Image (cartoon, coloured by chain):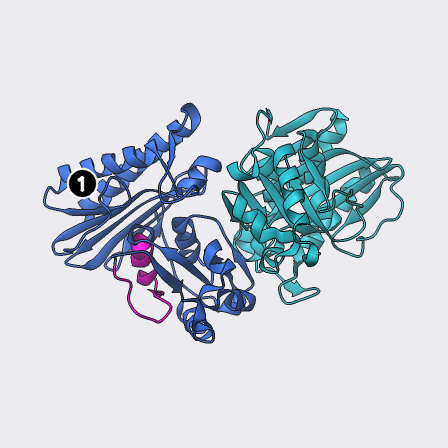
Chain colours: A blue, B cyan
Amino acid sequence: MQILISEVKSWLLEAGERLKEALLDEKLQVDTKLSRTDLVTNLDKEIQDFLVGKIMTFDPKAKILGEENGQDKLEDFSGRVFVIDPIDGTMNFVLEGENFCIMVAIYEEGKGVLGFIYDVMKNEFLWGGPSIGVYVNEERVQQTKYLSLEEGLLGVNAKMYTHNIGNLQAIGDVSMGIRMCGCAGVEFIHLALGRRAGYISNLAPWDYAAGQILVETLGMTVTKFDGESLNLDEREFCVAAGPAAYTQILKLSLENKEGY
Amino acid sequence: MQILISEVKSWLLEAGERLKEALLDEKLQVDTKLSRTDLVTNLDKEIQDFLVGKIMTFDPKAKILGEENGQDKLEDFSGRVFVIDPIDGTMNFVLEGENFCIMVAIYEEGKGVLGFIYDVMKNEFLWGGPSIGVYVNEERVQQTKYLSLEEGLLGVNAKMYTHNIGNLQAIGDVSMGIRMCGCAGVEFIHLALGRRAGYISNLAPWDYAAGQILVETLGMTVTKFDGESLNLDEREFCVAAGPAAYTQILKLSLENKEGY
């Protein structure tokens, strides 16, 4: 486990250096995928290839599920699976040059064992798993207090909020305020470090895999609005929060079910 | 002017050190003002008093308009006026420990001459004015390209967006995406540095004064939705953007006037 952890951390740090270098020196090649705001760059593809190469050298039998390069479906979670997001928050990477993450989650026989979220420009690296706890850079994250919805900020997805999916506007009204940053990894780091009461979004497996492993290790919960488990299969509405806020969010979402 | 600039910068840096120290070591005293989400802390008051003391020592004849301590109205803008916001983004200061700014704007005979926005935790310090240009830390900001609404992100105020004030949801749909960070200073820095096509919010004079001086120096515009000037008198709906995006926003807002 220790060797695996230090390997993955070194890959993400190296990939992060590459992204910083590209932001400084290169003109990005930006393409669109499903819509004009669904961006992909040459760096998303390059970093995915880099990570896949590292994984295949380290563990040739491992399976991979990842956002780019046609690796976005996986039926069989037996053995070891790496779920990777080479750039989470590609829009921010292109337009802000910050607030993007590189993420890796590792599953063994379908169980999440390690998560890694690296906010490259902020140099905030959250990593860990159920058997070792959670760390930010080299410091252990101590979960001392979960914020209730009334006490904390709520990270939300813009489209879900606009269309009031899951009664999200009412949920936001109970919180201290909503925030939209455009990057799931950044939101999961905020949640893990006590800067959020919760995070509600519409996420693909590579967007939530690492975050789920990390915040669940800290005693929080990540599910669909109806409390059902996420299935690592397709894009889903996700609720992530500590115990008190999680119960509040599910209760409030049931009061207006038309949206989902 | 040079002495004034280095004085104000040194005050903000010193105030920033005080805020960092307080976040590390102290239990904040948090009170509410107009609502349960309108927060003020002992540090807002302490930093305002610190800045007022520095201003009065440096220029005893200057007038002051500021968020805290009953200094929030000023009728007469003759002579030199300092507009101060000791902590812009108090909610973020309390709940995130980041994404807050200290801001100072200086007016001479009613004209904005200098603006200072210091994002304390990120150490991003935007300052300047029409006679000297704009700098981030010690580097000159070169405005080479203004993003159109279709090309860039849009910073928005949550309440305005939810209630579609000024047709804001449609404006957001034309942009590459909306962001809500809870701090006007952070948004003005983003706009000045090309990370936003625009910023639309509901702001008091101390929230927009420094930002308006800085982004107008860079050739952008800050007005009400109807194109009228802001009056430094009360909370107002504000549009801040470069030329192309500004025209698009005003046009789109006119298509649905019911909200304001």
In the image as oriented, which residue stretches furthest toward the front? B255
Residue at the (88%, 36%) spot, across then down: B79
- Residue A19 placement: quadrant: top left
Instruction: Reply yes or no: does residue A229 show up in magenta.
Output: yes
Nearer-the-camera pick, A210 or B7: A210
* Tag count: 1
Q: How crowded is mark 1: few (under 14 residues within 10 Å), some or many (20 or more)?
A: many
Residue at the (28%, 52%) spot, across then down: A115
Residue B202 location in percent, x, y?
A: 68, 52
Q: Is residue A158 above or below residue B193?
A: below
Instruction: Reply yes or no: does residue B158 show up in magenta.
Output: no
Q: Where is mark 1, residue-wise?
A: A55
Residue at the (20%, 39%) spot, across then down: A52
Specify the amino acid type for callout 1: Ile
Residue B203 location in percent, x, y?
A: 70, 51
- Left or right: where B73 falls relative to B207: right
Residue A156 location in percent, x, y?
A: 47, 57
- Left or right: where A88 falls relative to B221: left
Q: Is residue A240 visible?
A: yes
- Left or right: where B256 falls relative to A30: right
The range drawn in magenta is A208-231
Nearer-the-camera pick, A97 or B101: A97
Q: Can residue A122 be seen in this view?
A: no
